[in-house]
Structures are given as C-alpha cells and as structure tokens.
Amino acid sequence: MTAYDELMAFQRDTEALGQVAGRLGWDQETMMPHGATPQRAEEHAAMANILHARRIAPQVGEWLDKAEAADPVAAANLRHIRRDYERTAKVPARLAAELARTTSLAHRVWAQARADEDVASFLPILKQVVALRIEEAAAVAGNTDPYDALLDDYEPGATGESLGAMFAALRPRLVDLRAAILDRPAPAMLDQAFDDAAQLALSEKLALAFGYSLDTGRIDKAVHPFSSGSGLDVRITTRTNPRDPFNCFYSTIHEVGHAAYEQGIDATHLLTPLGRGVSMGVHESQSRIYENQLGRSRAFTGWLYGQMRDAFGDFGIPDEDAFFGTVNRVSDGFIRTEADEVQYNLHVLLRFDLERALIAGDLAVDDLEAAWNDRFKADFGYAVDKPSNGVLQDVHWSEGLFGYFPTYTLGNVYAGCLHVALRDAVPDLDDQLAKGDTSKATAWLRENVQQYGGLRTPVETIAHATGAAPSEGPLLDYLEAKFAGIYGL
C-alpha cells in the first residue's frame, strides 16, 4: 500500500467514528430520556477524545508527508485531512473533550430554560461555553482574528470582514424592500387548526416529492428541526404547530435540502472527507433553494394548495393565487426559522454581530439578552415579548456553534446564484413544479453541486455550478421581483 492508501484506510475509520458521534447528537435531540443527560455528556467527551487522538496521530503526519495525489480526488482528500490535522493539533485534547462535555450539558439546560422562559438559568453554562470557544479560537487563530478561526469550522476560507462587507451590501435593499412591503395590504393568513397527524402525513409526501430517500433516511420530530448524518444514513426532523402547518411543511422541505445534498454525493466518496457537504454555506444553499425558490414558487404552491385541500378540506383561502400570497406573507415575527424570505437575513445579521462581539470580548454574556432586545427593537421596530422569542430561541450557542449563523445568509446568497443558473438550464421548470414534480430541478442540483461533496472549496463549488463567482446581487434581484409581484410594488 502507498502512504496515501494507508492514510485513507485510517481515515475511513475516523470518518465512521465521526458518524457515530453525530448519531449520539441525533438521539439526544429526538429520543434520549431526559435523565440520561449527564451520561450522554461523558459519552460525547469520550468520542471527542478518541476523534481528537486519531486526527493528530503521529502516523497521520507521516503519511501526509509522504502521500502523493494521483488525481483531483486524492488532492482534495489530502487537502481536507491536512487542514483537519493542522487545526486539531492546535487544540489540546483536554479542551476538545471539555467542549464536547459542556455543550452536551448546555443543550439540555438551554431546552429547559427556553421552556421556563428563564434566561438566568442558562447564563452560567453559556459563560462556560463561550469561554471554552474563545480559548479554542485563540489556540487556532494565532495572530489572526479569533472569530475567523471559528467561522472557518463551518465555511472554510470565509472571514468575518468579508462576510460583514457582503451583509452590509445586503442590508439597505432588504430594509427598503421590507418597508415598502409593510406599507401595503398583506395577504390573508391561515386561521384555523390543522391536525398534527395530517400535517406529518403531508410532510412526508413533500419530502418524497423533493427526492428524499427513506431507504437511507427517516423523519422524526424535534424542538428545532435539523438534518444529521451522511452517506447511507441521513436523518431529518420536523415539528408541528396546529395553527401554522407551513412551519411543518417548509421545515421538512428545508431539511430535505440538507439531506438530499448528503444523499446525492457520489457513492465512491463514502466515509472519506469528500463524502459530506463542503461547507455549511453550500449546505444551506441546498436547503434554501429547495424551501424558497422551489417550494415557495408560484408554480409549486399551486400544486401544494391542492394537496392541502385534499388533506384539510376548505381552509379559508379561495384559490391558488391567494394561497401563493399566504405562503409568502411578510409579517412581524420573532422567530428566525419561521421568518419570511425578506426578513430572514435580518435575523441572521443580528446574531452575526452579537456573536462576533461575544468572541471579541466586547459583549459580556450577562449583557447578551439586553443587547439582543435592543438590537431587535432597532431592526424590527417592536420589542421582544419573551425570551423564547428572543435570545433563547436558537439552539446554536448552547452547542458552541459560534461562526455558524452567518452561513445561513451566505447560503441564501449562494442559492440566489444557483437559482439563476437552474432557470437557464431548465426553461420549463415552472411547468414541472406546477405538477409537484421537482425532479428536473433536483437532478440539476445533484449533477452540478451535490455529487461532488467536498471535492472543491465552497466558492469553487458555486462558481463551478453557475459559471460565476458568488455575489449578493442575484438574491436581492429575486426577492425584489418576487415580492413586487405579490405586493404590487
């Protein structure tokens, strides 16, 4: 065996153990008994220790020194393994284990604090999480921005400065569009209860319509919908709200976008560094284009209207055109995951700025709730009414995922670019979507983005699919055109 062959055989086991560690997290979110939290924290810590040791094992360094890339796939595998080796070597094993243990405990503390509307009960462990992530960032960053070191975990190559500039370009047009829309009469809202079981049945139908395979996946319920796993075991969750079935349907479509990316990766990359999505921004581009440009399009909502009539009978919306407006209604709200397309990115920009301040030491954890509430009032024009609609609404900070939030907006930007290329490639797209048939769209995404997994860098992945470097312009043009039509601007 060559040094490359030996390295990849070792890496295969590391990847498999990483999948097992991820499944512990899935179980914790969906099925784990409440009393198991302390033991699960130790299990997470043990897995983190094992993975940390494997990623910096002396033989990995020796193989990396000797390995030669015979083709682009081998070169990409070596790039990923070397990056992981060098980064992991900078983080003490003690710190990696303590992060895994503390974030496992923090997740359950956050869930209870959210249920109790009790920010104070969450702050002590959040301080621990923030302190540990700052320590990790300092170890990795060297003389560079510590926040960039955390961001690089989720979007390799991105920096807080570059994303800040992109977001600054997004904000004025989003704010102007929001103001123009809210000055116009809004489409009708849904105003009745929708049976949970019927929601879940239609949710599964939507998952299948977007190409999700239940042979290698499953759908469960969770407080915060998510997708987990890769290769031959890719699981999603959704949630129901009797007054808002769109929460269930579009959470499902969104998570199917993530899952379809993982299920669509070339099988030859299974249990290699290329066998998973290249970044969270690219991952989010798949979930957002499935959910919004496809799932909330006039063509697809026309089909969905018929499905909802079949499932729930007359639910008060007279026709497909009115239903399109209802699905895309822009209205006041607190929850990021339930936000309309126009306001969603404003929610993300708020979190991006706050977490950069936390990591920089410019914002104390004790002051986080007040800072959140002040910023929300300034951005949205009304006050947060309770913590579960404010600083406690997202799971991310309890899990130490600092640097993750900006990838949501970056994913929207990528989706805007992909949508233009998709429309050019599939001129009869709306005819297909009007029948509930997403196969041409999902096949194009699988062929041009998903199958490659981690072969290219994030920016290269989008440029390869679209023929141009990603920019915020296509997203803004799409939003302005779509909502000008709905609201008569």
Image (tube, helix red, strand yellow):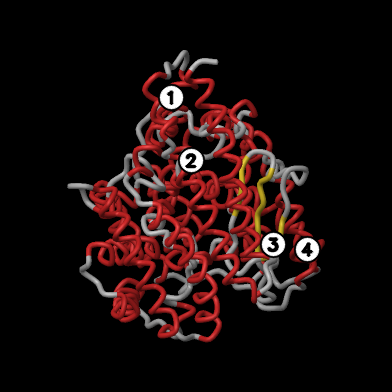
351 w.r.t. 411: above or below: below
In the image shown, does 358 or 106 lie closer to the viewer?
106
The quarter of the rendered structure image containing the N terminus is top right
Q: Are marks 3 and 2 in contact (CB under 8 Å)?
A: no
Question: Dot 1 corresponds to which residue?
Answer: 63
* Foreground disc of the pair 1, 3: 1
In three-dimensional space, the C-alpha distance between marks 1 and 3, rounded to whole angstroms, equals: 63 Å
Residue 306 as seen in the image, left or right of residue 386? right
Residue 80 as seen in the image, left or right of residue 274? left
Residue 319's label in the rendered image is: 3
| Sequence-earlier tag: 1 or 4 | 1
The quarter of the rendered structure image containing the C terminus is bottom left
Residue 54's label in the rendered image is: 2
Provide the secondary structure element on which disc 3 rests. loop
In three-dimensional space, the C-alpha distance between marks 2 and 1, rounded to whole angstroms, equals: 13 Å
| Sequence-earlier tag: 1 or 3 | 1
Question: Dot 4 corresponds to which residue?
Answer: 309
486 w.r.t. 66: above or below: below
Residue type, mark 1 in image: Trp
